[in-house]
Image: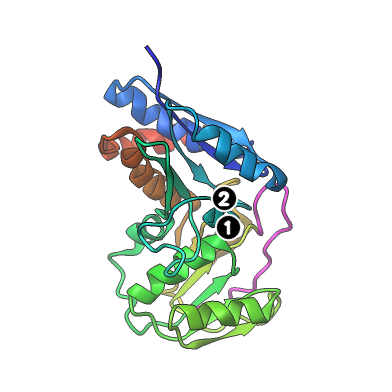
Amino acid sequence: MTTPFAEVIGDPIAQSKSPLIHKFWLSKLGIPGDYRAFHVPPDELVDYIAGACADADWRGCNVTLPHKIAVMDLVDDPGGVRDTIGAMNTILRQPDGSVIGTNTDAAGFYAPIAEFDLEGAPVAVVGAGGAARAILFALARAGVGHVTILNRSPLKAMGLLATFGLKGDVVALDAPLPPVALLVNASALGMLGQPPLDLDLSNLPEDALVYDAVYAPLETGLLAAARARGLETVDGLEMLIGQAALAFELFFGKAAPREHDAELRALLLK
C-alpha cells in the first residue's frame, strides 16, 4: 500500500514548522499519510515540480520563500490567483497528473483579525513580496483605509497598491510609522538568519494591533516591542496554522481538527 504525502518547499526550509502541524493533524485523525520539508533552491524549482507531479502519492506542496511568485509559471491557475493575489502558496496534484496552484495565505492571515472592524482604518504593511500580496488582498477585501507600505523598492510597492485598488503611499523602511490601527510585518525581516526589523512604535495609538507573520522566532523583536508598549499582538503561528488548515483539507480530504489548536500551539512552542 502506498502512502500519500505532501511537502513544504523553500530556500531555506529548516525553520519550517509545517511538517509538525500537518503530522499532528494526520495523527489526530488517524489518516495514513506524511508531510515533509524539502529544500528547493530557486534553480531547482522547475525540476522539483516536474518530478513531484510524476509521483501519484504526492498530493502537493506548500510554497514558502522565495518561490511564491516564481511557481505561478509552472502550474495551472484555474482560480485566477495570478490576476488577483499574484502569489501561490499551495500546489495541488490532480488525479490526471496535472498540477494547479492556489493561495491559502490570505484567508489564513485574516482569520485571527476578522473580529476587528478595519473598514476605513489606516494600516501599515512592511514588505512587498509574496506574503504581502496575500495580506494586501485580504486587507482590500476588508475595506481598509489609507495603506502605508514600508519597503526597500518604492516602485514595486506602489504597483501593489494599484493592483489591489488601495489608496496609500510607500515609504522607506526607516521612515517614521504613521499612527495606524494595524501594523503588519509581511517581510522576512526579524526571521532567524535575517536582519532585524527595527521600528519605532511610539506613533501607534494605544489601541493599535501589531501582527507579525514571522514565526521563527515566534517572539520577534517587533512583537516584543509591541507588548512592551501594551499593544495587542498577533503572532506568526496564527497565520501559519490558519493557512495550513486550509491546505491540509485540500491535500488529505479531511478538515483539520482545529479543536486541538491549544495542544498544537503548545507543541509548536516547545
Q: Quadrant of the N terminus?
A: top left
Residue labelled with disc 1: 224
On the rendered structure, is 235 left or right of 143?
Answer: right
Q: Is residue 155 above or below residue 38?
A: below
Q: Earlier in the sequence, mark 2 or mark 1?
A: 2
SS for tag 1? helix
Can residue 89 be seen by looking at this rendering? yes
Give, as a single range, the part of the protein colored magenta.
189-205
Q: Secondary structure at mark 2?
A: loop
Q: Position of residue 210 (x, y in %)?
A: 48, 66
Amino acid type, label 1: Ala
Q: Residue at x 31, y 40 (%)?
A: 249
Can you give x and y, in whole percent of width and height, for residue 227 in the image?
52, 61
- The residue pinned by badge 2 equals 219
Query: Does the magenta stretch mainly form a helix, a strand or a loop?
Result: loop
Q: Nearer the viewer, residue 14 or 34?
A: 34
Q: Residue at x 73, y 48 (%)?
A: 193
Report if residue 193 lies within the magenta region.
Answer: yes
In the image, residue 176 lies in the stretch drawn in magenta: no
Residue in the picture at 67% in, 44% down: 11
Image marks 2 and 1: residues in contact by CB distance under 8 Å: yes
Q: Residue furthest front?
A: 96
Query: What label sits on residue 244 in the rendered view?
Result: none
Residue type highlighted by circle 2: Glu
